[in-house]
Image: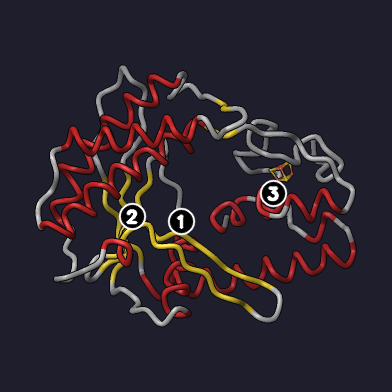
């Protein structure tokens, strides 16, 4: 949620706190699940499968088996989605499955061999780790950390474009500390770009983020969100959440408030 808050706090509130917004009497646009979510889930499952094997056996499993694990999860997820919204990069279910195949091969070749885990590590302590922590009396912060290596927190992105996610990974680091786990010295963002089927895979990138900056940015943003939610519950006023009508995501396609009484810019 946090990176979207920087783009438009009001749009982020519609995603994260739709029950509070609708409970105050506002109707929001109905949005299906984006196909990118399903491709991301499949790719993450491939990575989880291969790294779990690496942690327990010391070697990577055959890439074909990792692809199978990811695609199996991809199809399983589809049965849970009520409606799916396709885009021009992934116009069908089959293209999504093909993209998981490509992204899994890239992860297996470009990222997995470089990751180091402590000896005798337990995969569940290092992969897809769900953590939560209370903030004050009435709020909770939670998040899913993709991968914790010996020295790094690694977050994997499979979107078309990479947007800055410092606040998200800073939040993960705050969750580690709150749960009395060791903060990692590095925060790495691995980007496996999802591209159209007919395009050549453009290459994996690894970005390093400054850890203390991420922690600080995240902490202040979380407190801003809590303040805004409290103000909205008291007043019912959408202006409690600052709007950004100049956002490139300000459209009915991406925003549940667009064209509703909750946000009347357009
Ligand atoms: S319509 Fe635009 S300004 Fe209003 S909440 Fe949505 S993205 Fe933000």
Rounded to the nearest angstrom, the CA distance separating label 3 from label 2 is 26 Å
User: Counting other residues with Cα less than 10 Å from the Cα at mark 2, is it few (<14), some (14-19), or many (20 or more)?
Assistant: many
Question: Which mark, residue 244?
Answer: 3
Q: Residue at x 34, y 40 (%)?
A: 43
Observer-nearest residue: 93 or 14? Answer: 93
Q: Residue at x 44, y 67 (%)?
A: 172
Q: Is residue 250 above or below residue 234?
A: above
Question: Which mark, residue 165?
Answer: 1
Percent position of residue 177, x then y = 43, 79
Q: Quadrant of the N terminus?
A: bottom right
Percent position of residue 23, x then y = 85, 52
Marks 1 and 2: CB-CB under 8 Å? Answer: yes
Figure quarter occupied by ligand 1: top right
Query: Does any atom of ligand 1 lie closer than 8 Å to the CB of label 3?
Result: yes
Q: Secondary structure at mark 1?
A: loop
| Mark toward the start of the polypeptide (1 vs 2) | 1
Question: Which mark, residue 59?
Answer: none
User: Counting other residues with Cα less than 10 Å from the Cα at mark 1, is it few (<14), some (14-19), or many (20 or more)?
Assistant: some
Rounded to the nearest angstrom, the CA distance separating label 1 from label 2 is 9 Å
Residue 44 left/right relative to 234: left
The image quarter in which residue 28 lies: top right
The residue singled out by tag 2 in the image is 189
Q: Residue at x 41, y 82 (%)?
A: 180
């Amino acid at each position: 949620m946090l990176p979207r808050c920087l783009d438009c706090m009001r749009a982020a509130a519609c995603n994260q706190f739709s029950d509070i917004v609708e409970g105050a009497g506002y109707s929001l646009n109905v949005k299906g699940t984006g196909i990118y979510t399903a491709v991301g889930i499949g790719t993450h499952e491939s990575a989880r499968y291969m790294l779990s094997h690496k942690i327990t056996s010391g070697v990577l499993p055959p890439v074909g088996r990792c692809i199978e694990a990811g695609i199996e999860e991809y199809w399983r997820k589809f049965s849970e989605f009520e409606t799916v919204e396709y885009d021009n990069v992934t116009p069908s279910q089959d293209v999504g499955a093909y993209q998981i195949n490509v992204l899994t091969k890239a992860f297996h070749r470009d990222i997995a061999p470089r990751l180091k885990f402590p000896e005798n590590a337990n995969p569940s302590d290092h992969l897809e780790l769900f953590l939560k922590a209370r903030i004050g009396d009435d709020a909770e912060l939670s998040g899913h950390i993709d991968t914790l290596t010996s020295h790094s927190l690694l977050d994997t992105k499979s979107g078309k474009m990479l947007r800055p996610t410092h606040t998200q990974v800073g939040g993960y680091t705050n969750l580690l500390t709150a749960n009395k786990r060791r903060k990692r010295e590095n925060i790495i963002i691995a980007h496996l770009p999802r591209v159209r089927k007919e395009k050549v895979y453009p290459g994996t990138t690894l970005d390093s983020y400054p850890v203390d900056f991420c922690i600080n940015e995240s902490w202040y943003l979380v407190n801003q969100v809590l303040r805004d939610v409290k103000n909205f519950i008291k007043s019912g006023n959408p202006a409690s959440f600052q709007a950004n009508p100049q956002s490139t995501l300000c459209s009915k396609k991406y925003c549940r408030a667009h064209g509703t009484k909750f946000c009347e810019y357009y």
